[in-house]
Image (cartoon, rainbow, N blue to C red):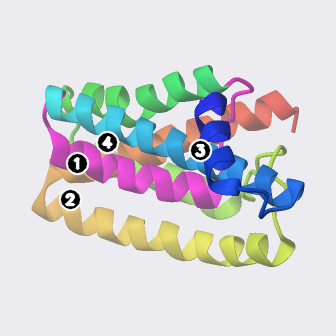
Amino acid sequence: MDRITNSIVRCLNDNKFSPKDIELFTYGLNISLRYLLFGAFIFGLLFFLGNIGYVLVFDLVLVLLRFHCGGYHTENVVTCFLLSVFSLVIVPEIGLSYNISAAVSCLFMTICFIFMLRSQPIQNEKKKLNSDFVNKVNQRKNIIIVFFYILFLFQLIISNQIANMMMLAFLYNVLSMLVELIRKGR
């Protein structure tokens, strides 16, 4: 991946950019290509496995929760990729195979809801984020959690399967947060 991005940046450079700019372009292009390949792989796998609508509900909820609440981060890019595929495709596919009652789903969702409201967001220590950005994310965290919880309650009436995907995303993110907290020794 690095070779590809370095080649592209070298072709675009023509000695117009400073070394710091080149480093920034290379980093941004590398991240963009990783996400593009990851997205193509995920959608290809989803198309092959089916249940795209339900899995995308799970993915949307999980990605937003993960961005605002944090969770476990791996050290290795390959491990991150494999764990992300497992999290975004395999977990919801497994979840669809179980018929979870509305009462059990509501109980788990409520426990996760309370845990996430009371917890502080877990930040990836490798990323150095602007404090204003972190404060804005923290302010939105509770709004998003409450919004998804209310949406979940409406989905219990309309579609138990969608409600279960939302509950599973909440549960999976809480477990990810707990793993990271245990790993950090808090």
Q: Quadrant of residue 139?
A: bottom right
Query: Is there any visible trace of residue 67 in the rendered image?
Result: yes
Whichever of labels 2 and 1 marks the residue nearer the N terminus, that label is 1
- Percent across and percent down for residue 150 are 35, 71
Sooner in the amino-acid sequence: mark 2 or mark 3:
3
Q: Report the disc number at residue 102.
A: 1
User: Residue 156: which numbered mark, if any?
Assistant: 2
Please name the amino acid that badge 2 sits on. Leu
Q: Residue at x 49, y 44 (%)?
A: 35
Q: Nearer the viewer, mark 3 or mark 4?
A: 3
Residue at 33% across, 47% down = 58
Callout 4 touching callout 1 (CB < 8 Å): yes
> Toward which corner of the image does residue 159 lie, by quadrant?
bottom left
**What residue type is disc 3 on?**
Ile
Question: Which region of the structure is painted magenta?
Answer: 49-76
Tag nearer the camera, 1 or 3:
3
Give the CA separation, mark 3 to mark 4.
Answer: 52 Å
Res. 1 image quadrant: top right
Give the camera-side residue of 58 and 1: 1
Between the residue at mark 4 and the residue at mark 2, the CA separation in whole angstroms equals 11 Å
| SS class, disc 1 | helix
Say which amino acid is labelled 1: Ala
CB of mark 2 within 8 Å of CB of mark 1?
yes
